[in-house]
Amino acid sequence: MHDKILVLDFGSQYTQLIARRTRELGVYSEIKPFNTSINDIKDAAPRAIILSGGPASVWDEESPTIDPEIFKLGIPILGICYGMQITVHLLGGKVERSEKREFGPSKLQISDNSDLLEGIPNGSDIWMSHGDRVLELPPGFSPIAASDNSPLAAVKNESSKVYCTQFHPEVVHTKFGKEILSNFIFDIAGCKNTWTSKSFADSTIKEIREKVGSSKVICGLSGGVDSAVAAVIIQHAIAENLYCIFVDTGLMRFNEAAEVVDSFKNMGLNLIHVDATKRFYEKLKGVSDPEKKRKIIGEEFINVFDVEASKINGAEFLAQGTLYPDVIESVSVKGPSATIKSHHNVGGLPEKMNLKLVEPLRELFKDEVRAVGFELGVPANILNRHPFPGPGLGIRIMGEITQDRVEILRLADHIFMDEIKKAGIYDDIWQAFCVYLPIKTVGVMGDERTYEDVIALRAVTSLDGMTANWSRIPYDVLESTSVRIINEVKGINRVVYDISTKPPSTIEWE
């Protein structure tokens, strides 16, 4: 059994980073809503609790809060930013609205380096992001560090093992943030760093074997990292009782369907390949609205999957490649979010088919999925593949999807991939792809005027896809890509590069 840290989420943009940092240190962490009950916290049996930051003020009428009984559990607690302010507020100290808000870099002036700040250089860089500040400490607390604008930048109650920082140790801008978290996790909370990709794989395989027994499991393979790693974990647990269904929608990348089939067969997976290309094109004829396209592709995928799955006698479980960010979003402190875009998965299948779920990756972030896949011997060409949306090229074609447009986009995308691979930068990019814009623009080829469509190039850097920055691809690579696309892809006379970040833009265009 691994040690566990609970991160109570008050809505900070950095909450996931806290969980990631603890896992990088080899300790398993879970994010829970701020209002998780005392009983649920006891049942989780964490070795420590971290209270995240958040956008609210303790003085707001509906500001998120926690049950003060948490501080009586005897569990070490670290409050960060808003987590510090709510701790001070609930335990009898005073928090004020600061006249001068503090956002950005600052310097840490350490007055006590005996535990939380042990080994941290005085004057080191920290990252602040707060409006309120602590004016007066609760009984039993003492200051351990200050900043230019926060006399109480870090405090502690050593006897009750409650520590707080006004700054964010989880962000890279805090130079020794990981060391501060390490001091709390190991020296104060006494955790052991036993959570690794190997230990996760071993324990998950054992759990699946116990849960599934001799029953059969159906897994929908997309060709992406998540479904591949999920399938391999389950295969290690139940061998030939796993049945993988790969539905070729006709919206895959260049030669991808054939590569997926070959790769999975070489991995020894029990694979059922369904070419449903014509069926998808017929259903999508004349449809331009992005949400309608997504829903048609999703529903048709389920219909095809359902037909094939019904042929497998004795199937009781459905495998899904759900990741931890999906789980976090479903219990987010921020409440119901507006639908930015519907996601394409097989989430509707269990109810329709009366199957129980197996989700072996639901505790992992994307980079952890790759690490587990590497541990289990999943080929590098699958693990290092850029993320690809379930609706495939269908949401990279603005407007109606036609076979001609798919072929144009597929070839342009292949050229882009070829150029960034030749430049040796494919693995430095989180995701790169082309978007087809059916917008006629004027061009000149030879002595003739052209009036043809546009291809947009999109490439981003990211850790987990939650936020992303546009990739600084060298100009010569962009130039060679543009020249090749215009010369080799009939119907395209203009190439543009998307330099938007997420947020406010999304990675995909639809």
Image (cartoon, rainbow, N blue to C red):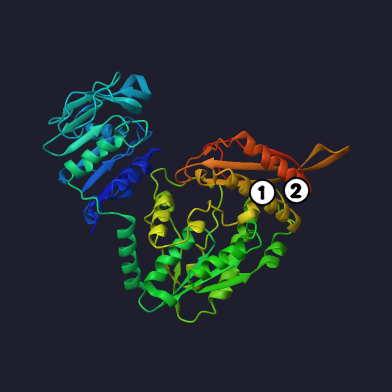
Say whether residue 100 is left or right of residue 137.
right
User: Which of the 4 image quarters holds residue 149?
Assistant: top left
Does the residue at mark 1 contact the one at mark 2 (Cβ under 8 Å)?
yes
Say whether residue 392 is left or right of residue 186.
right
What residue is at 31 percent from the left and 64 percent from the top?
Answer: 202
Measured from the top left, where is residue 106 in percent x and y? 33, 23
Q: Secondary structure at mark 1?
A: helix
Q: Earlier in the sequence, mark 1 or mark 2?
A: 1
Q: Which mark is residue 479?
A: none
Residue position marked by numbered label 1 in the rendering? 415
User: Which of the 4 image quarters holds residue 246?
Assistant: bottom right
Towards the viewer: 429 or 107: 429
What residue is at 52 percent from the left and 70 percent from the top?
Answer: 265
Say whether residue 269 is left or right of residue 308.
left
Quarter of the N terminus within the rendering: bottom left
Image height check: is 412 above or below 106?
Answer: below
User: Which of the 4 image quarters holds residue 425?
Assistant: top right
Image height check: is 302 above or below 42?
Answer: below
Q: How many marks?
A: 2
What residue is at 70 percent from the left and 39 percent from the top?
Answer: 495
Q: Amino acid at mark 2?
A: Glu
Towards the viewer: 214 or 296: 214
Measured from the top left, where is residue 334 in percent x and y? 41, 43
Measured from the top left, where is residue 401 in percent x and y? 71, 55
Q: Residues within 10 Å of mark 2 (few under 14, many from 20)?
A: some
Q: Which mark is residue 488?
A: 2
Say whether residue 265 is left or right of residue 59.
right
Visible residue check, residue 181? yes
Among all residues in the image, which is located at the extreme right?
A: 447
Visible residue check, residue 292? no
